[in-house]
Image: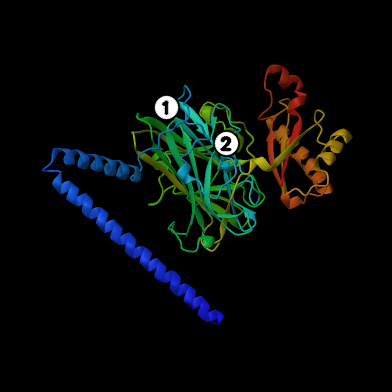
């Protein structure tokens, strides 16, 4: 028998076996269903049979409720704050192909978006992000940014569609739990009309959506905040507009004054944040200002904003709403590029692949000392690092504006040294903090604190 006939014969045998299996299975199902129906009919005549029918009915009812999404009960011990451990999630959402421990499957879910090789959120095209959310539930705070103080750090499971041989994601879903709440972060590319598209690689915008389901037995008072850190190409300070009109920093919009869209632009590259549209769940408040100020969500209204503004960001807040038991609430905006700029991409923060070093400077100096330069050279070594983040800081002595410029100078010198040690210019991200994070008491303002005169270099593979 030749190979072609052999293949056809084997296929025929498989199909015949399949049809037989289906035939017997279907007949078996019909027989079982007939028996159940007969049993239920007889139950009206025989009390004992009626009890059996009731038991069957109860089991079917329970199974159906489970299919409909009855909250999965947590077997893990809860702490005093009634908090679901971030390492607990229903096992059904994990891929059966995962063999590594549960902790290795969790990420914080922060994301960055780019157009081609250019960034429209800070960090792209590298696996680094400063954008994040903060959730307030019944007076307690949680965030997917582990660096925020006074908040519970959340990690979740990533479910995504990834391009082959690439770090680039087309769609992304990250699922978290906190305070008996199930939080689902979904990022899906859409077209210029903010509608779903078939070819997901040609999107103009990303739908950024958070779905929060109350799985507790009591209602929850929920407030939700999303901070986006735009960076247009390599420019961390962007020009800003609201509904096409130029705006400055340190602005607040709320209620009826909320613009339909904000734009962040530099040269011919522009990114838009859509805040009002039929497909948007509009925020109640939007703050446009410096990233460092807006990250301090817990004291945002009380902060005294400095005169220097050199790192544009936008914070969106949905005011407190009560979510009843089993209720689901959504928050949704869109961020991307205008028509004619199709092809935005998404990447997630990957903090576990980083190494970090802190370099210190003399007062009012931006040049690396020979000792600090040697430390940096040894730190970089002969490894091939994918990218670097360079953050500049100063002490509190002097004016805010001068300190911001000093932190930029320190970044420039360290960036130059990194290039000499083998990291290309276009692979270096820069963030100037000035004195924002410095010790700020009377002594520090008079003399400065040497621990604050620094540059922190983060590199990752």
Pointer 2: residues within 10 angstroms few (<14), some, or many (20+)?
Answer: many
Q: Nearer the viewer, residue 430 or 167?
A: 167
Any part of residue 145 in sight: yes
Q: Position of residue 115 (x, y in %)?
A: 59, 57
Applied colour scheme: rainbow
Q: Position of residue 382 (x, y in %)?
A: 83, 47
Label 1–label 2 contact, CB within 8 A: no
Pointer 1: what residue? 138
Q: Residue 454 vs residue 188: left or right?
A: right
Task: Decide if residue 64 is on the left or right side of residue 257.
Answer: left
For label 1, the crowd category at 10 Å Cα-Cα, with few meaning under 14, some 14 to 19 and many 20 or more, is some
Instruction: Say which residue label 2 marks.
Output: 145
User: Which residue is depicted at the point 81% across and 49% down?
Assistant: 422
Compared with 9, 304 (above or below) is above
Identity of the residue furthest to the top in this view = 443
Give the camera-side residue of 94 and 233.
Answer: 94
């Amino acid at each position: 028998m030749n190979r072609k006939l052999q293949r056809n014969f084997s296929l025929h045998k498989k199909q015949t076996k399949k049809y037989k299996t289906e035939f017997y299975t279907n007949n078996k199902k019909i027989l079982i269903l007939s028996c159940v129906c007969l049993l239920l009919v007889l139950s009206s005549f025989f009390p004992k049979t009626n009890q059996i029918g009731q038991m069957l009915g109860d089991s079917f009812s329970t199974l159906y409720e489970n299919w409909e999404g009855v909250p999965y009960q947590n077997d893990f011990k809860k702490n005093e704050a009634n908090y679901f451990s971030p390492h607990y999630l229903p096992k059904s959402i994990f891929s059966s192909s995962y063999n590594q421990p549960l902790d290795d499957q969790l990420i914080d879910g922060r994301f960055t978006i780019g157009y081609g090789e250019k960034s429209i959120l800070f960090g792209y095209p590298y696996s680094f992000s400063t954008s994040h959310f903060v959730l307030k539930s019944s007076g307690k705070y949680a965030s997917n940014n582990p660096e925020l103080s006074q908040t519970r750090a959340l990690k979740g499971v990533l479910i995504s569609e990834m391009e082959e041989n690439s770090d680039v994601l087309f769609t992304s879903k990250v699922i978290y739990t906190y305070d008996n709440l199930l939080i689902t972060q979904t990022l899906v590319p859409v077209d210029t009309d903010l509608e779903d598209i078939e070819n997901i690689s040609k999107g103009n915008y990303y739908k950024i959506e958070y779905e929060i389901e109350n799985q507790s037995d009591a209602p929850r008072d929920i407030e939700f905040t999303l901070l986006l850190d735009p960076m247009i190409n390599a420019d961390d300070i962007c020009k800003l507009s609201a509904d096409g009109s130029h705006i400055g920093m340190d602005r607040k919009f709320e209620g009826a004054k909320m613009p339909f869209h904000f734009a962040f632009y530099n040269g011919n590259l522009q990114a838009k944040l859509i805040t009002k549209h039929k497909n948007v769940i509009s925020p109640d408040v939007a703050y446009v200002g410096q990233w460092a100020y807006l990250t301090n969500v817990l004291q945002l209204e009380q902060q005294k904003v400095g005169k220097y503004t050199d790192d544009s960001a936008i914070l969106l807040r949905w005011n407190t709403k009560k979510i009843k038991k089993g209720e689901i609430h959504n928050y949704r905006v869109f961020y991307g590029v205008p028509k004619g700029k199709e092809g935005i991409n998404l990447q997630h923060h990957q903090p576990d692949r980083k190494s970090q070093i802190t370099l210190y400077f003399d007062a009012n100096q931006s040049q690396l000392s020979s000792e600090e330069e040697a430390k940096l050279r040894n730190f970089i070594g002969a490894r091939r690092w994918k990218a670097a983040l360079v953050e500049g800081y100063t002490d509190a002595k002097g004016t805010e504006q001068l300190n911001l410029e000093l932190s930029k100078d320190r970044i420039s010198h360290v960036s130059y040294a990194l290039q000499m040690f083998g990291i290309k210019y276009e692979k270096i991200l820069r963030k100037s903090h000035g004195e924002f994070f410095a010790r700020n008491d009377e002594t520090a303002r008079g003399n400065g604190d040497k621990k604050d005169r620094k540059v922190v270099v983060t590199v990752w593979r």
